[in-house]
C-alpha cells in the first residue's frame, strides 16, 4: 500500500494562506491529505473557500501554533506528518522525494534544505541547510540552538504516540523543544535537497517577537540541558 502523508497547515490571519494550500495540493505525490487548522482567525478566512472541497478544515479558538499543530495531528489519518506554515510553500516534489528518502533510510524523522523567498514569492537565497560530519556534531549544534526549519520536517506519526505532542505552553519554541525530545529516541536524518520555500516578510513572528524568542530559547536549552549532556556523552563513547 502507498503510505499516506498528512500535511498540517496552522492558519491565523495570514494573507499567504492560498499559496501554502496551493503548494500542498499540487504535490506530485498523490496519497496526501491537507489539513488546515484555523486558530481563531478574524481575517483572510475567505481565501480558503475555493479549497474547502479539497482540504480538511478545522476551526478552533486561538491557542497558538503548537495547539493548531496538535489539533491537526490528532485529526490526521496519515502514516507520516509534515508541517507547512501558512506563509511558506512546498516545492511540487517535496513529499515524493522526502518520503522516498525516509523509506530508503528507514527513518522516523527527517528534515531538508530550503530556499528563502521574499514577500512576493521570489527565491532570494541559495539552498540553506547544514550537513554535519557525524551525529555528535549534530547533537552539539542542537544543544546550542536549532538548525532545523520546522516546515522541512517529515515524521512518522508513531513519533507523537511515543514522545507526545508539541508543548502548547511555548508560543515560539515548541518546535525546538520537540526536536530536543525527539533526538533522545530517534536519529534526525538530513536531506540536502531544498524542498521548501521559507518566506521572509515584515509580519513574520521571528521578526516581531525577536526578544521573546531569545528568552524562550534560553529556557528550552536549560530544560533539556541534562538530557542533552547525557546523550552527547553516550554518542561520544560510541563514535570514538
Image: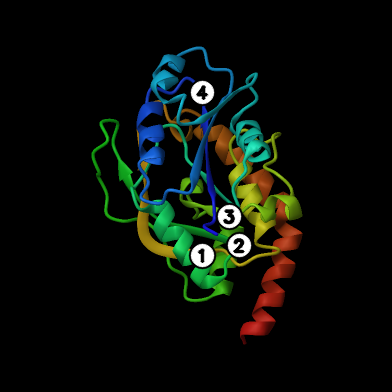
Distance from disc 1 to disc 3, alpha carbons, whole Å, reads 9 Å
Distance from disc 4 to disc 1, alpha carbons, whole Å, reads 30 Å
Q: Does residue 105 sit above or below 3 in this rendering?
A: below
Residue at x 74% of width, y 68% of height: 230
Residue under label 3: 155
Q: Residue 181: x percent and y percent?
A: 69, 55
The numbered mark, 4 or 1, whose residue comes first in the sequence reads 4
Q: Quadrant of the C terminus?
A: bottom right
Q: Residue 108: x percent and y percent?
A: 60, 62
Judged by depth in the image, the label closer to the viewer, 4 or 1, is 1
The numbered mark, 1 or 2, whose residue comes first in the sequence reads 1
Distance from disc 3 to disc 2, alpha carbons, whole Å, reads 6 Å
Residue under label 1: 102
Q: Residue 138: x percent and y percent?
A: 54, 67
Query: Do the CB atoms of the residues marked 2 and 4 lie less than 8 Å apart?
Result: no
Residue under label 4: 12
The numbered mark, 2 or 4, whose residue comes first in the sequence reads 4
Query: Do the CB atoms of the residues marked 3 and 2 lie less than 8 Å apart?
Result: yes
How was this image coloured? rainbow
The numbered mark, 3 or 4, whose residue comes first in the sequence reads 4
Per the rendering, the mark at residue 108 is 2
Distance from disc 3 to disc 4, alpha carbons, whole Å, reads 23 Å
Categorize mark 3 by other alpha carbons within 10 Å: few (<14), some (14-19), many (20+): many
Per the rendering, the mark at residue 30 is none
Residue at x 61% of width, y 31% of height: 68
Query: Do the CB atoms of the residues marked 1 and 2 lie less than 8 Å apart?
Result: yes
The numbered mark, 3 or 2, whose residue comes first in the sequence reads 2
Amino acid at each position: 500500500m502507498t503510505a499516506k502523508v498528512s500535511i498540517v497547515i496552522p492558519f491565523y490571519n495570514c494573507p499567504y494562506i492560498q499559496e501554502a494550500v496551493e503548494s500542498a495540493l499540487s504535490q506530485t505525490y498523490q496519497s496526501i491529505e491537507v489539513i488546515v487548522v484555523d486558530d481563531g482567525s478574524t481575517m483572510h478566512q475567505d481565501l480558503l473557500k475555493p479549497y474547502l472541497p479539497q482540504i480538511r478544515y478545522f476551526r478552533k479558538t486561538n491557542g497558538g501554533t503548537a495547539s493548531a499543530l496538535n489539533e491537526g495531528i490528532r485529526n490526521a489519518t496519515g502514516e507520516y506528518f509534515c508541517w507547512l506554515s501558512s506563509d511558506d510553500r512546498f516545492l511540487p516534489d517535496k513529499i515524493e522525494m522526502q518520503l522516498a528518502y525516509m523509506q530508503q533510510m528507514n527513518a522516523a524523522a527527517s528534515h531538508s534544505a530550503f530556499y528563502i523567498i521574499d514577500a512576493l514569492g521570489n527565491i532570494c537565497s541559495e539552498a540553506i541547510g547544514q550537513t554535519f560530519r557525524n551525529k555528535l556534531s549534530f547533537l552539539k549544534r542542537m544543544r546550542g540552538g536549532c538548525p532545523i526549519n520546522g516546515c522541512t520536517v517529515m515524521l512518522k506519526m508513531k513519533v507523537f504516540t511515543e514522545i507526545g505532542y508539541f508543548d502548547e505552553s511555548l508560543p515560539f519554541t515548541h518546535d525546538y523543544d520537540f526536536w530536543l525530545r525527539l533526538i533522545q529516541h530517534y536519529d534526525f536524518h538530513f536531506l540536502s535537497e531544498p524542498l521548501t520555500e521559507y518566506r521572509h516578510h515584515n509580519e513574520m513572528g521571528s521578526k516581531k517577537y525577536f526578544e521573546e524568542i531569545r528568552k524562550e530559547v534560553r529556557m528550552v536549552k536549560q530544560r533539556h540541558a541534562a538530557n542533552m549532556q547525557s546523550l552527547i556523552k553516550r554518542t561520544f563513547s560510541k563514535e570514538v
